[in-house]
Amino acid sequence: MSQTVLRMEKELKKKVQLNYLLHLPDGYEKGSPKKWPLILFLHGAGECGDDIELVKIHGIPKIVEQKPDFPFVAVSPQCPADSSWNVEQDAVMALVDEITAHHNVDSKRIYLTGLSMGGYGTWHLAAEYPGRFAAIAPICGGGNPKRINELKGTPVWVFHGAKDNVVPLAKSEEMVSTLQANGGDVKFTVYPDLKHNSWTTTYDNPELYTWFLSHSI
């Protein structure tokens, strides 16, 4: 089943809007008692704007185009131009609530991942909404080590290229070392020969999805 292009609009204290891609896996049946795990994917800075096709260039949306049997509901919002995932956090979480409420989603198995700007967004959202995500996988991003207390209860698998010349490896190292020092549940994979694009290898690795599914709230 191919992913469809949709738009979410919902009233909170403010109106929020986001274009997004939604993938429903082969075998998904509306109204079925079966509940599916959900992956929320946050893209990088190069895919911001209003051309939703850009979001399919990398990461989870690219994977599901190639593998319609990808066994997760996948939600991939598009960050507007001149914005960031930190700014759009209310809209992103409203989208997660909307999808969870209207689709067969297992609310105990909601996972978060993103690359580059989306890696930063992954760290940020997990700290802003502790306990909401069963596990997170930030790729070539960074975060605020002062928010580590909010992250300690969330399993984390961090990925980064050692030769990254866009986001220094030190950004991930700082978060990982702080989490480790505070008893966090964290794994860290450094690719010794990769530059900024450490996401292709990561998202092509089936072990990532097995790891996600090993965690629930």
Image (cartoon, grey):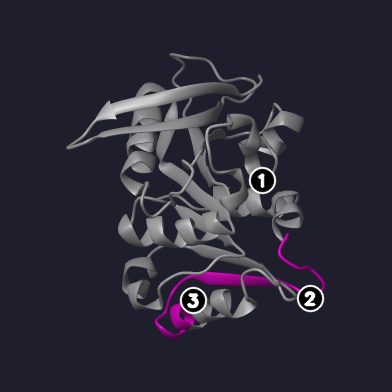
Q: CA distance from mark 3 to mark 1?
A: 22 Å
Element on which disc 1 rests? helix
The part of the image, by quadrant, that contains residue 26 is top right
Q: Residue at x 36, y 51 (%)?
A: 87
Query: Mark 2 — residue?
Result: 192
Query: Mark 1 — residue?
Result: 59
Position of residue 95 relative to residue 44, above or below, is above
Q: Residue at x 72, y 61 (%)?
A: 198
Instruction: Name the foreground residue: 212 vs 13.
Output: 13
Q: Amino acid at mark 3?
A: Met
Q: Position of residue 91 (x, y in %)?
A: 34, 39
Q: Is residue 189 magenta?
A: yes
Q: Position of residue 121 (x, y in %)?
A: 46, 56
Residue 175 badge: 3
Count every numbered label the image shows and give the total. 3
Is there any visible trace of residue 67 in the rendered image? no
